Image (cartoon, rainbow, N blue to C red):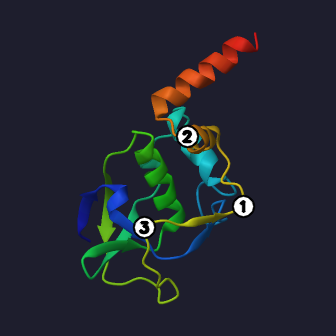
Amino acid sequence: MAELRIAPSDIYYSQSSISNCFSEASEHTENSIGDTVDGILLKRYRIDDIPKISVVRKGDVWVTADNRRLWVFKTLESLGQCARISVIIKKRISNKKSVVQKDIKVRGDPGGIFYKLKTQHQMNFHDVLLAMSRICLDTK
């Protein structure tokens, strides 16, 4: 199968919303998507531990059916920690996933500290780490 390296922000979602947790079929079973981001940022696992997403070409854009994983990669990218990912190019995805959009709604709390701090304060990863270290120092 052909592969491509692409920025997560250049890939579109194929659904209007996603669950806040990975399914039982995933290696990260029942982990929230935000906790998965935290695990990568805190070096509990690597970006490469998340399976590659598959993409299809729809018009002039790339679309994936792997929407939760794309959310994780896009969040890491927004924190300055993931510029490009390897993706697998496929010919088609499920007809059930026919939406083509840049953003997605997460059903429930995505979890994770970094995502929450980032969205509440529009911080990058290093600012979030600095804020967290100050919190840790203040509690001692």
Identify the image quadrant of residue 2.
bottom left
Q: Is residue 35 left or right of residue 73?
A: right
The amino acid marked with disc number 2 is: Lys
Q: Nearer the viewer, residue 103 or 48?
A: 103
The amino acid marked with disc number 3 is: Lys
| Residue tagged 3 | 102
Callout 1 touching callout 2 (CB < 8 Å): no
Q: Residue at x 64, y 38 (%)?
A: 113
Q: Quadrant of the N terminus?
A: bottom left
What kind of element bears circle 1? Answer: loop
The amino acid marked with disc number 1 is: Gly
Q: Is residue 99 above or below residue 82?
A: below
How crowded pointer 3 is (Cα within 10 Å; few <14, some 14-19, many 20+) is rated as some
| Residue tagged 1 | 108
- Sequence-wise, which precedes: disc 1 or disc 2? 1
Give the total of numbered labels.
3
| Residue tagged 2 | 118
- Sequence-wise, which precedes: disc 3 or disc 1? 3
Q: Position of residue 116 (x, y in %)?
A: 63, 43
Q: Nearer the viewer, residue 86 or 97?
A: 97
Q: Position of residue 7 (x, y in %)?
A: 31, 55
| Closer to the eye: label 3 or 1 | 3
Residue reaching furthest bottom? 95
